[in-house]
Image (cartoon, helix red, strand yellow):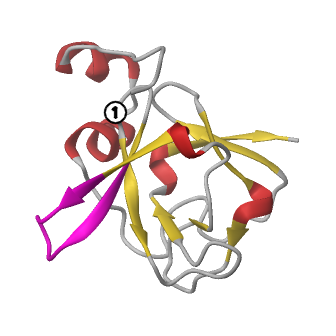
Amino acid sequence: MHPNKIVKSDAEWKQVLAPEEYRLLRKKGTELAFTGKFHDFKGKGTYTCAGCELPLFSSEAKFNSGTGWPSFYQPIEQDAVEEHLDVGFGVRTEVRCARCGGHLGHVFDDGPPPTGRRYCMNSGALHFAPA
């Protein structure tokens, strides 16, 4: 559990998030492939949680997975994200922000070295801070 956990009611999240951010982060939505603002984005910097701005992924760990979603081989800090079993559409591993619990996407074991993991995230669940 993140030491500075953020807990808000559903109504409070609706007030502070844009409608698409709310759908993705709080209702476990998914963007259509190749439609998110970061799927082919090449900027250098840090991807943060759109719900609480916790730094999640470095552009250095981003790679082109060909899936249509921004993909990373590791988070900045392992405790920045939490992984949960998701059986809503087959069996997958859901990735949530460790601080606010927002749904970010899923992680798969078919990524590149050095981790072999692919954190497949929704662009709308992320913000970007340029380096």
Please identify the quadrant where the C terminus is shown.
top right
- Side of 49 where 13 appears, left or right: left
Which of these two is toward me, 111 or 39?
111
Q: Callout 1: few (<14), some (14-19), or many (20+) C-alpha neighbours within 10 Å?
A: many
Q: Quadrant of residue 23?
A: top left
Q: Is residue 125 above or below residue 61?
A: above
Residue 62 position, x and y percent, is 70, 66
Residue 55 position, x and y percent, is 64, 35
- Side of 74 where 31 appears, left or right: left
Identify the residue at image location x=52%, y=39%: 79
Identify the residue at image location x=48%, y=14%: 4
User: Does the magenta segment cover residue 86?
Assistant: yes
Q: Residue furthest right?
A: 131
Disc 1 secondary structure class:
loop
Residue 100 position, x and y percent, is 39, 26
Residue bearing mark 1? 101
Q: Quadrant of residue 22?
A: top left
Q: Is residue 80 above or below residue 120?
A: above
- Side of 80 where 94 appears, left or right: left
Please identify the quadrant where the N terminus is shown.
top left
Identify the residue at image location x=78%, y=65%: 42
Q: Quadrant of residue 126?
A: top right
Q: Residue furthest left?
A: 88
Q: In this view, does 22 lie above or below 68?
A: above
Looking at the rendering, the stretch of residues picked out in magenta corresponds to 84-95
Disc 1 residue type? Gly
Identify the residue at image location x=19%, y=21%: 10
Residue 82 position, x and y percent, is 39, 44
- Side of 94 where 111 appears, left or right: right
